[in-house]
Image (cartoon, helix red, strand yellow):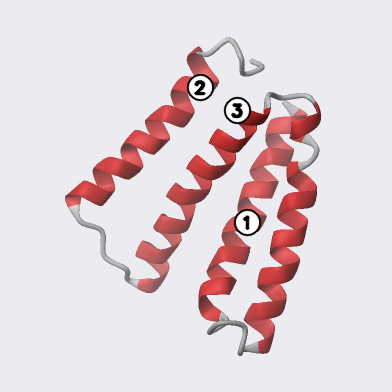
Amino acid sequence: MRFYLILAAAILAEVVATTALARSASFTRLWPSVLAVVGYGVAFWLLSYPLRVMPTGVVYAVWSGLGIVLITAVAWLGYGQRLDPAAILGLGLILAGVLVINLLSDVAPH
C-alpha cells in the first residue's frame, strides 16, 4: 500500500510539473519553468520507488493513465479547455483500463 501512496505522489508531482510546463511559454517564464523542472525531478525520483516492487508495465500504466486523466481535468476545470464527447469517452476508457489492471489483474499487488 505504501508504494501506491508514493506512486500517487509521483503522479501529483507530474501533474503539477506538466501544468507548469504549459504555463512556462517554452521555458521563457522563470517560475513556471523552475516548477516544471523541479516537479519532473520529484516525480521521477518518487516513481523509482514503486518500480522496485511492482511490475514496470503496471507502474507505467497507472502513472500515465491517471496522469492523463488528472492533467486533462486540471486543464478543463482550471483553464477552461474544452472536451468533446469523444475525449470524455477516451478518458473514461483510460480510467477503466487503470481500474481493470489494479482491481482484476494478478500482476498488480493487491
Circle 1 is placed at which residue position?
14
Q: What element carries label 1?
A: helix
Instruction: Return the disc, 3 or 2, that comes first in the chain's sequence.
Output: 3
User: Hey, what amino acid is under mark 1?
Assistant: Glu
Q: Which of 7 and 40 is in front in this view?
A: 40
Percent from the top left, x then y, of residue 68? 46, 50
Q: Are marks 3 and 2 in contact (CB under 8 Å)?
A: yes
Q: Which of 78 and 63 is in front in this view?
A: 63
Q: Identify the disc placed on residue 22.
A: none
Q: Which of 72 and 107 is in front in this view?
A: 107
Q: Is 4 positioned to the left or the right of 91 in the image?
A: right
In the rendered image, which quarter is residue 34 located in? bottom right
In the rendered image, which quarter is residue 41 located in? bottom right
Circle 2 is placed at which residue position?
101
In the image, is residue 77 above or below residue 98?
below
In the picture, which quadrant includes the C terminus? top right
Circle 3 is placed at which residue position?
58
Instruction: Return the disc, 1 or 2, that comes first in the chain's sequence.
Output: 1
Residue name at image x 77 percent, y 46 percent: 46
Q: Which of 1 and 38 is in front in this view?
A: 38
Percent from the top left, x then y, of residue 6? 74, 40
Crowding around mark 2 (Cα neighbors within 10 Å: few <14, some 14 to 19, many 20+) is some
Question: Label 3, label 1: how many angstroms apart (C-alpha)?
Answer: 17 Å
In the image, is residue 84 above or below residue 62?
below
Percent from the top left, x then y, of residue 7? 68, 39
Q: Is 90 positioned to the left or the right of 24 in the image?
A: left
